[in-house]
Image (cartoon, rainbow, N blue to C red):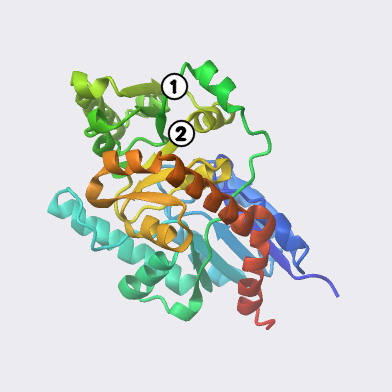
């Protein structure tokens, strides 16, 4: 009897979300085909449509604006699949924004944002068969704010991909010109990622706040939100007491350099705002570099369940960083990160997806 066919890892080419988790499901009764589309070229989807239509399950591994261009939303694809596809559609939501989050924006923008959240989640709820989130907090948000049924949502932490070629720490530090303690803020530089909250406290931090981002992409796109925020954070560092503990590395970040910054750092800082999960959170676990994060619900859940992140209570990052770097706390976090990696690594995550696949195809 042929295996059921599942299409897993529907994501863009440059996504940080690994499709490798699919390989572990193959050994557990499913024939897997992994696929990618080209970022900002949604018409590239037509190349993989034949595989989609032949699958028993389509498992989409991405967020709301999967189709590219400038945030073309996902739900038109779900609408298409509902009427032209006979299999089951599972959607992993990596973030679930709350409509109740208080953002510093105009009333009109706030109304439009909430309308968008309500519309897109209503479409996802009605045109997909099952939803996965990466924490119970997001699962409860979908139920309480968007009317999803709890029995059609499962929380499975994001798979952690093992880094095959881990850069050597001392060699990376030498190459990057780093010394002493270094606390890394890396990746997309937007206000919601909260770098300013850490920089404001840099004079109380024993070490260097290392800010690494690919600013050239923002300049090319003339991304005003990123450029304005980068200018603001730079202006904070002009204060000599703060600036002596802050370093900006604004450059292209190919993957090999990305991992060198992780290897060279002592802590990964995640000063994120409410409602955000983080791919960098997963990368830090993969590299087993302890983290300090804001006390948002997402990080609170992982701190309580697994003890893999130090929380900056009430935004006090300086105290949290100085506490996390103490040898006894640091060693404890590294040990728990290793345990977490063993449980939720790509090599074992397939076993956690299999019951969901069986449930939606009613094989149980």
Q: Which residue of the protein is positioned furthest toward the right in this rendering?
A: 1
Q: How many marks?
A: 2
Callout 2 touching callout 1 (CB < 8 Å): no
Image check: 220 left or right of 158? left
Q: Position of residue 68 (x, y in %)?
A: 47, 45
> What's the mark number on residue 266?
2
Q: Is residue 303 above or below residue 152?
A: above
For the point 32% across and 30% down, the residue is: 206
Q: Position of residue 94 (x, y in %)?
A: 46, 56
The quarter of the picture where residue 352 lies is bottom right
For the point 19% across and 56% down, the residue is: 102
Q: Position of residue 260 (x, y in %)?
A: 55, 28
For the point 45% across and 45% down, the residue is: 328
Confirm whether residue 68 shows in the render. no
Quarter occupied by the N terminus: bottom right
Q: Secondary structure at mark 1?
A: loop
* Circle 1 Cα neighbour tier, 10 Å, few/some/many (<14 / 14–19 / ≥20): few
Quarter occupied by the C terminus: bottom right
* Circle 2 Cα neighbour tier, 10 Å, few/some/many (<14 / 14–19 / ≥20): many
> What's the mark number on residue 140?
none
Residue assigned mark 1: 251
Q: Secondary structure at mark 2?
A: loop
Q: Which residue of the protein is positioned furthest toward the left in this rendering?
A: 107
The quarter of the picture where residue 212 lies is top left
12 and 162: which is toward the camera: 162
Q: CA distance from mark 2 to mark 1?
A: 21 Å
331 and 275: which is toward the camera: 331
Image check: 224 left or right of 13? left
Q: Is residue 212 above or below residue 20?
A: above
In terms of sequence position, does the residue under pointer 2 or pointer 1 come before the other? 1
The quarter of the picture where residue 220 lies is top left
């Amino acid at each position: 009897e042929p295996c059921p066919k599942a299409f897993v890892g529907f994501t863009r080419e440059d996504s940080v979300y690994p499709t490798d988790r699919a390989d572990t499901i193959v050994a557990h009764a499913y024939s897997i085909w992994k696929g990618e589309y080209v970022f900002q070229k949604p018409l590239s989807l037509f190349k993989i449509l034949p595989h989609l239509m032949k699958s028993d399950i389509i498992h989409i591994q991405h967020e709301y604006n999967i189709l590219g261009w400038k945030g073309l939303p996902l739900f038109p694809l779900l609408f298409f699949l509902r009427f032209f596809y006979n299999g089951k559609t599972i959607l992993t939501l990596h973030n679930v924004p709350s409509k109740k989050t208080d953002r510093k924006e105009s009333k009109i923008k706030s109304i439009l944002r909430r309308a968008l959240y309500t519309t897109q989640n209503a479409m996802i709820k009605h045109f997909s068969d099952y939803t996965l989130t990466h924490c119970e907090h997001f699962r409860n948000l979908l139920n309480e704010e968007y009317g999803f049924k709890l029995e059609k949502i499962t929380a499975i932490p994001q798979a952690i991909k093992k880094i095959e070629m881990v850069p050597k720490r001392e060699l990376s530090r030498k190459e990057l010109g780093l010394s002493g303690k270094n606390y890394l803020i890396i990746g997309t530089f937007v206000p919601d990622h909260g770098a300013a909250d850490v920089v404001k406290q840099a004079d109380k931090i024993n070490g260097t706040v290392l800010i690494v981002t690919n600013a050239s992409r923002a300049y090319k796109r003339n991304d005003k939100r990123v450029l304005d925020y980068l200018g603001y954070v730079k202006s904070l560092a002009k204060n000599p007491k703060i600036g002596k503990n802050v370093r900006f590395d604004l450059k292209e970040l190919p993957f090999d350099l990305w991992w060198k910054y992780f290897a060279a750092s002592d802590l990964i800082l995640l000063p994120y705002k409410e409602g955000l999960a983080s791919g960098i959170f997963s990368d830090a676990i993969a590299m087993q570099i302890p983290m300090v994060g804001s006390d948002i619900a997402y990080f609170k859940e992982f701190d309580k369940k697994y003890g893999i992140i130090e929380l900056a209570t009430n935004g006090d990052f300086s105290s949290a960083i100085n506490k996390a770097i103490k040898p006894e706390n640091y060693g404890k976090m590294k040990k728990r990160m290793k345990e977490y990696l063993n449980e939720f690594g790509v090599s074992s995550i397939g076993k956690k997806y299999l019951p969901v696949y069986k449930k939606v195809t009613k094989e149980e």
